[in-house]
Amino acid sequence: MRVLLVEDNASLARALRFALRPRGFVVDVATTAAEGAYHLDVYPYDAVILDLRLPDEDGLRLCRTLRARDRRIPILILTALDRPEDIVRGLDAGADDYVVKPVDVDVLAARLRALLRRARRPAQGPVLTWRDLRLDPAARQAWLAGQPLDLTAREFDILEYLMRHQGRVVSTEELMDHIWGDDLDPFSNVVRIHIHALRRKLGDSPQQPRYIETVKGRGYRFGAPGATP
């Protein structure tokens, strides 16, 4: 899951980014509201963590801007402002949750997961399906021909991303960027290793792909028209 953290405190941003990573979140950091708006226009995110005291403008304005665009992305405000009237203003501006600093990272991760579960159900449907493959993003479970699939967290994230972009070629770089963020060595073969493991668990093969097709020199495609039935 990829999250945008809009926070101008560099040490706090680094700490949260490092702490949320083993909890299943890839975190990009923006230090101003303008930078945050740019990231949200360019990159797909699953959620936003938003500070209110930003150097260029009040974080509430960015929150209102996102909601004015009718975006369904979950927004969690993380701030030191703890007065009841501050909380009311934050929630009324369109935030889905309001957390006061300092916060326990496990609590923050749990709140993010709760927001993502609620956001995914109405907007994207509870289950992704392709032939005899089913994947439930909210429950983080997958089944093949009715049998549970034992997937690692990264394998699940890759399969979910490919299924959400069914029929489109997804490059290795796009998968690395979305699943791992910019901490991964761009020359790493980690994507190929995970795709190989996924194919083995799906009973798939590069020669006769039923689910994941390799498009030479471009990347991978899920549910390709040429995939065998």
Image (cartoon, helix red, strand yellow):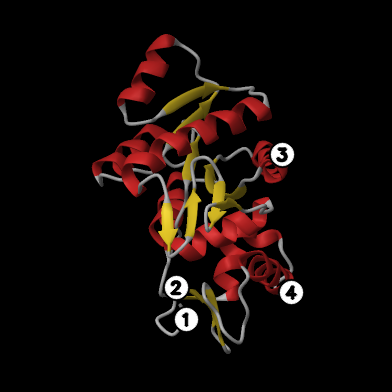
Secondary structure type for disc 1:
loop
Q: Quadrant of residue 94?
A: top left
Calculate the distance from the C-alpha at mark 3 to the C-alpha at mark 1: 40 Å
Name the residue located 67 percent from the left edge and 52 percent from the top edge.
150
The residue under label 1 is 227
Quadrant of the image occupied by residue 176: bottom right
Residue depicted at 52% across the width and 52% down the height: 146
Cα separation between marks 3 and 2:
35 Å
* Quarter holding residue 61: top left
SS label for mark 4: loop
Residue type, numbered disc 1: Ala
Residue extending farthest to the front is 146
Distance from the alpha carbon under mark 1 to that under mark 2? 7 Å
* Residue sitting nearer the eye, 18 or 146: 146
Q: Confirm whether residue 33 shows in the render.
A: yes
Are discs 1 and 4 less than 8 Å apart at CB? no
Q: Earlier in the sequence, mark 4 or mark 3?
A: 3
Choose between 207 and 54: the one closer to the eye.
207
Label 2 and label 4: CA atoms lie apart by 23 Å
What is the crowding at mark 2: few (fewer than 14 residues within 10 Å), some, or many (at least 20)? Answer: many
Residue assigned mark 4: 189
> Quick check: can you spot residue 58?
no
**Above or below: residue 179 compared with residue 114:** below
Q: Nearer the viewer, mark 4 or mark 3?
A: 4
Sequence order check: which comes first, mark 2 or mark 4?
A: 4
The three-letter amino acid code for the residue at tag 2 is Gly
Return the residue at label 3: 19
Q: Give the residue at x 57% y 84%.
A: 208
Q: Residue at x 67, y 44 (%)?
A: 17
Tag 2 residue: 223
**Amino acid found under the numbered disc labelled 4:** Asn
